């Protein structure tokens, strides 16, 4: 794959992640019955929160969404879409789960690739991918007065970490990074779906009588 094609694919994945997280932010904000400004703010911080942390940590100045207005336009368009077609997304909990899962999958591989470009160690790249995927959701949940999903027993950050390990395990065998991105992202999605479907969660540190 040429560098130009690789950058284009990377950019498309980043935009798709932005769309998914912006819509998930809208769904949470609407569920909290926020006004239009509140909905837009929650969509915005959900979409760019993880990417902003990623860019700050690798020393990108200014952060990517400030340099490229495409991300701002995408967030506005995604917010309007989610509000206008909210009746099609009436099963809010299911829709939120879907877009949130797609978002963490896409942002995990974007964060990992950013770390590789910066010359970071694979373990640091996986950590960077996980933070990129999860931090926007953390900000969203805090602003909406919810305990962030990453701090609950649900399989969330764990799915991102396993997707990251899959990325590096297959990196030596797949020359085409497009397939590598897709497979690693699908691993994140499948692990999260199976965990919810089979009710798999991390063990609790507390006994019932401690709660």
Image (cartoon, grey):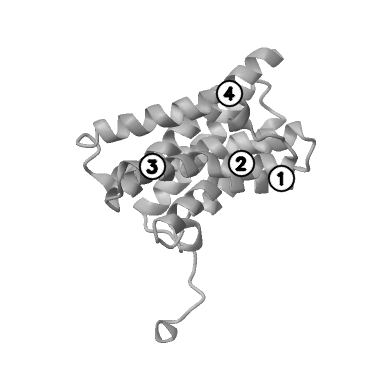
Q: Which circle, 1 or 4, is nearer the viewer?
A: 1
Residue 55 spot, x, y in % from top left: 67, 39
Q: Position of residue 135 (x, y in %)?
A: 55, 49
Check disc 3 and report its element: helix, strand or loop.
Answer: helix
Residue tagged by mark 3? Answer: 24
Q: Residues within 10 Å of mark 2 (few under 14, many from 20)?
A: many
Q: Earlier in the sequence, mark 1 or mark 3?
A: 3
Disc 2/disc 4 C-alpha distance (Å): 15 Å
Q: Which residue is mark 1?
A: 57
- Nearer the observer, disc 3 or disc 2? 2
Label 2 or label 4, whichever comes before in sequence order = 4
Of the numbered discs 1 and 2, the one sitting upstream in the chain is 2
- Label drawn at residue 52: 2
- State the separation of the CA atoms marked 3 and 2: 18 Å
On residue 11, which mark appears? Answer: 4
> Which residue occupies the foreground of this view, 139 or 124?
139
Q: Mark 1 and mark 3: span between their CA atoms?
A: 25 Å
**How dense is the environment of label 3, judged by Cα within 10 Å: few (below 14), some, or many (20 and up)?**
many
Which is more foreground, mark 2 or mark 4? Answer: 2
Q: Nearer the viewer, residue 23 or 149?
A: 23
């Amino acid at each position: 794959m040429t560098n130009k094609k690789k950058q284009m694919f990377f950019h498309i994945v980043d935009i798709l992640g932005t769309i998914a997280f912006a819509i998930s932010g809208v769904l949470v904000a609407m569920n909290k019955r926020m006004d239009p400004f509140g909905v837009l703010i929650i969509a915005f911080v959900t979409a760019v929160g993880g990417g902003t942390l990623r860019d700050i940590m690798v020393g990108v100045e200014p952060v990517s969404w400030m340099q490229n207005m495409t991300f701002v336009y995408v967030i506005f368009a995604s917010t309007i879409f989610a509000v206008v077609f909210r009746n099609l997304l009436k099963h809010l909990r299911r829709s939120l789960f879907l877009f949130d899962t797609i978002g963490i999958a896409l942002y995990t591989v974007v964060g990992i690739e950013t770390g590789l470009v910066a010359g970071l160690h694979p373990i640091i790249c996986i950590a960077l991918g996980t933070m990129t995927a999860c931090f926007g959701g953390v900000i969203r949940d805090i602003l909406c007065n919810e305990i962030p999903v990453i701090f609950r027993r649900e399989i969330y950050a764990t799915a991102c970490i396993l997707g990251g390990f899959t990325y590096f395990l297959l990196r030596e065998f797949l020359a085409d990074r497009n397939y590598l991105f897709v497979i690693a992202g699908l691993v994140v999605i499948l692990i999260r779906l199976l965990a919810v479907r089979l009710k798999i969660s991390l063990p609790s540190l507390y006994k019932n009588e401690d709660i």
